[in-house]
Amino acid sequence: MQTTEEIRTISYLSNSSKLDSEEIEELLIDTMTNNNKIGIGGILIYSNDTFFQIIEGYTKDIDRLFAKIELDKRHFNVFKIFDRKVSIKKFERFSFSYIRVEDEKISNELMSFLEIGDNFGDETHEMLVGKVKNLIKDSK
């Protein structure tokens, strides 16, 4: 059965509350398990006490999830980079699309890309997804 529900993607940055490696791993497992249960796709990157995340799914699910994210005490200073409708998901599942980036070069590359500002159209969204996927490849 095909659905006509709107698909939405949100990307944000936030600062980590002081979490140790074990707490970050627990966050990963919880995120993957919970997001896959409700059909949310995306990626979570952790670097230098900063989280970068993209979440994609049906609007009602994304609204509910992002409200929970904003209240989560494991991070603060949640800064939404973009929030937009998309025609197709770029991340079908929330799987091991999590990397702990300690490489300063990779962190700087991501941060320089994010300086684009508010010009997040379709082309920019495609480029952001491509950059994130390259970060995953480069980190392995």
Image (cartoon, rainbow, N blue to C red):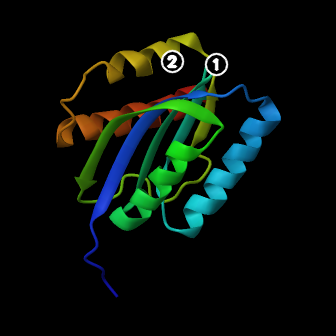
Classify residue 130 as left or right of residue 36.
left
**Pointer 1 residue:** 102
Instruction: Count residues near mark 1 (Cα–Cα under 10 Å), then give few for <14, some for 14-19, many for 20+.
Output: few
* Mark 2 residue type: Ser
Compared with residue 35, is residue 26 higher up or lower down, i.e. above or below?
above
| Residue visible at 43% across and 22% down in the picture | 110
| Residue visible at 55% across and 40% down in the picture | 44
Question: SS class of the residue under badge 2?
Answer: helix
Instruction: Count residues near mark 2 (Cα–Cα under 10 Å), then give few for <14, some for 14-19, many for 20+.
Output: some
Compared with residue 84, is residue 124 higher up or lower down, i.e. above or below?
above
Q: Which residue is more in the foreground, 30 or 74? A: 74
**Pointer 2 residue:** 107
| Residue visible at 39% across and 31% down in the picture | 131
* Residue 11, x across and y down, in percent: 39, 40
Classify residue 86 as left or right of residue 63.
left
Q: Which residue is more in the foreground, 92 or 134? A: 92
